[in-house]
């Protein structure tokens, strides 16, 4: 069983930065794509960023390109989301998730779809004040 635990959320002013971490249990972390999603109150869960098992390629939703950076350390079983220039509209619960897919090509077609992720963390709250 894979467990994912997010940390690093909090309250920050607009323009500030936060770094989210997601620690995974299990020895297969380095073999699968990992993603970050977020869900704001009253809205559906949406894709934020994803990273292939080998750290490349990475993928981002348009609204965070140039501000957020996803990375991973397979030796530490951890994936990160560096969030800079935060905006009030980034306020949400952020979830990390492990994909079903280790194949680079298959993941390239599935990274944005929550249904293509097998395991999810409990989420961490990010609140950006204006």
Image: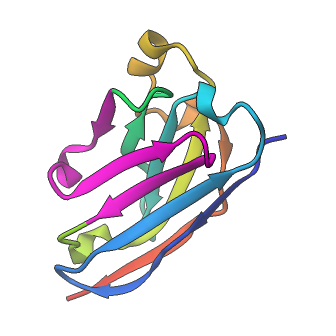
The location of residue 86, given as percent across then percent down, is 23, 72
- Residue at image coords 42%, 60%: 43
Q: In terms of depth relative to the viewer, which is nearer, 89 or 99?
A: 99
The location of residue 103, given as percent across then percent down, is 53, 13
Q: In terms of depth relative to the viewer, which is nearer, 82 or 74?
A: 74
Asked if residue 45 shows in the view, the reply is no
Single out the residue that lies furthest toward the right.
1
Q: Is residue 17 above or below residue 123?
A: below
- Residue at image coords 40%, 39%: 50
Asked if residue 36 shows in the view, the reply is yes
Left or right of residue 65: residue 75: right
Q: Is residue 61 above or below residue 54?
A: below
Q: Which residues are magenta?
A: 57-83
Q: In terms of depth relative to the viewer, which is nearer, 67 or 43?
A: 67
- Residue 36 lies in the magenta stretch: no
Left or right of residue 91: residue 31: right
| Quadrant containing the C terminus in the rendered view | bottom left
The location of residue 52, given as percent across then percent down, is 44, 28
- Residue at image coords 76%, 50%: 3
């Amino acid at each position: 069983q894979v467990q994912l635990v997010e940390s690093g959320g909090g309250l920050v002013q607009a323009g500030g930065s936060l770094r989210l971490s997601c620690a995974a249990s299990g020895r297969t972390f380095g073999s699968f794509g990992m993603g970050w999603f977020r869900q704001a109150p009253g809205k559906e869960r949406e894709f934020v960023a994803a990273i292939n098992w080998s750290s490349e390629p990475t993928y981002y939703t348009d609204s965070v390109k140039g501000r957020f950076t996803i990375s991973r350390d397979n030796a530490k079983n951890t994936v990160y989301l560096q969030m800079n220039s935060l905006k009030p509209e980034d306020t949400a619960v952020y979830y990390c998730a492990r994909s079903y897919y280790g194949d680079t090509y298959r993941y390239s077609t599935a990274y944005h779809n929550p249904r293509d992720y097998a395991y999810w963390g409990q989420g961490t709250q990010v609140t950006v004040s204006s």
